[in-house]
Image: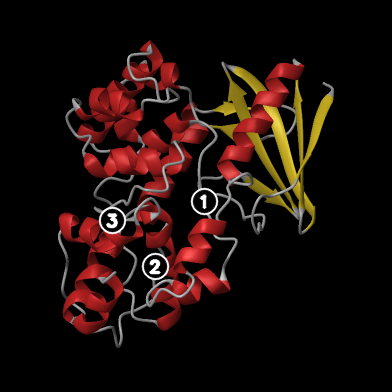
Amino acid sequence: MPEVRQTVRPRWVFRLPGAAPDGVLRRRGAVLERLVHVDGAPAVVRVAQPARDAVLFGARADDRAIALEAIERMRFALGVDDDLSAFHERFRRDPLIGPSVRLRPWLRINRRPDPFEALAWAITEQLIEFPRAVAIQRRIVFRLGRRCADTGLRDLPSAPRLAGTAPALLQSLDLSAGRALALRRAAREVASGRADLRAPDHERGWRRLRAIPGIGRWTIEMLGLHGQGRYDLVPAGDLNLIKLVGRLATGSPHARATEEEVRAFFAPYDGWGGLAAMHASRAARARSYMPWPGRNSFVSAAPASGGLRSSRLRAIQSP
C-alpha cells in the first residue's frame, strides 16, 4: 500500500502524547501508531514529532482518499491544529489553573478519531472505577474489534458490529446488563444514521441518545469533549471533579459537590470549561490535595492533604 505523508506545523505548543490505556493507540519509541477505519476501510496511521514545530503524519491504505481522511481524523484526535493561545493568554494567571497552564502549555484534551468511540467508552465507564472500565474496553477490542494482520494493530468494533452484538456477550466481558443494552441501542442509533455524531448540529444527535435509558448528561458531555472537540463541556459527573470542587468550596477532604455545583464552578472558564477542568486536576495533583481517583475520564489524582479554603473559591470565581 502506498504511504501518504503530511508535515503539520502545530498552531500552538505541541507535545506528542503517550499510548492509550485501551491498547488501540500505541507508541513505539518516538512514533505513535493507530489503526483507523474510514467507512469500513482500514488505514494505518503513524505520527512522529521530528521537531518542536513539526509533526509528521504518515498513512497507508488501499485508497489515497482513505489515507488522507485517516490523517485528518488523527490530526483532530491529537489536537495538533488547535490554537490554544487565547486560553493561555486569558487563564495563565488564574489562581487555580494558572500554574498548570504555564507549566504545561501543550496540554490538550485526549480525543478520538471517531466520535462513536468516545460514546462507546463513556458508556463502559459509567459508575465504575476507571481501571475496571479500561479492562472492559480492552476485552471489547480483543473480542469484537478489528485487527490489521500486517501490523497487529487493533481498532474498536464499528457501530454496526456492536449494534448486532448480543447483550449477553457484552455482559460476559464484565459490562453490566443495563450498560450492555445502552451500548447496543446507542450503536443502533449511530449505525442507522439517526444519531449522526459528525453532523455540525451536535445537539440533535444528543437528543436521540438521551432518549436511551442509561445515557445521561455525563455520557453526552464525554462524547462532546472527547469525540466532537467541544472544549466548553465539563464532565460534571466525574467523581474526582465532584470531590475537588467540594473540597475547594468547604476545605473538608470529605465534601462532595453536586454536578450543578461543578458546572457552576467552571462556568467562569466559558468556552474552555473542559480544558480548565483538566488543568485543575493536574494542578490539584501537583499540590497533593486531590482525592484518590474514582471513575472515568482524564482525571488523575493524589491523596488528599491540605487544601484551598472557600475564600480562594470566591477569588477563583470572581470576575
Please state which amino acid type lies under the numbered disc 1.
Pro
The residue labelled by disc 1 is: 21
Residue at 84% x, 22% y is 2
Please state which amino acid type lies under the numbered disc 2.
Ser
The residue labelled by disc 3 is: 238
Please state which amino acid type lies under the numbered disc 3.
Asp
The residue labelled by disc 2 is: 281
Res 196 quadrant in image: top left
> Which residue is farthest right?
2
Residue at 16% x, 68% y is 256
- Label whose residue precedes the other's in the sequence (1 or 2): 1
Residue at 21% x, 80% y is 253
- The local crowd at label 3, few if under 14, some if 14 to 19, many if 20 or more residues have their Cα within 10 Å, is many
Q: Nearer the viewer, mark 3 or mark 1?
A: 3
Front-most of residues 138 and 242: 242
Image spot of residue 79 (x, y percent) = 58, 46
- Label whose residue precedes the other's in the sequence (3 or 2): 3
- Label whose residue precedes the other's in the sequence (3 or 1): 1
- Which image quarter is the C terminus in? bottom left
Res 224 quadrant in image: top left
Side (left or right) of 285 relative to 128:
right
Give the Cα distance between marks 1 and 2.
Answer: 19 Å
Which type of secondary structure does the marked residue at label 1 adopt?
Answer: loop
Residue 150 position (above or below residue 296): above
> Which residue is farthest bottom?
306
- CB under 8 Å between discs 3 and 2: no
Which type of secondary structure does the marked residue at label 3 adopt?
Answer: loop
Side (left or right) of 197 relative to 107:
left
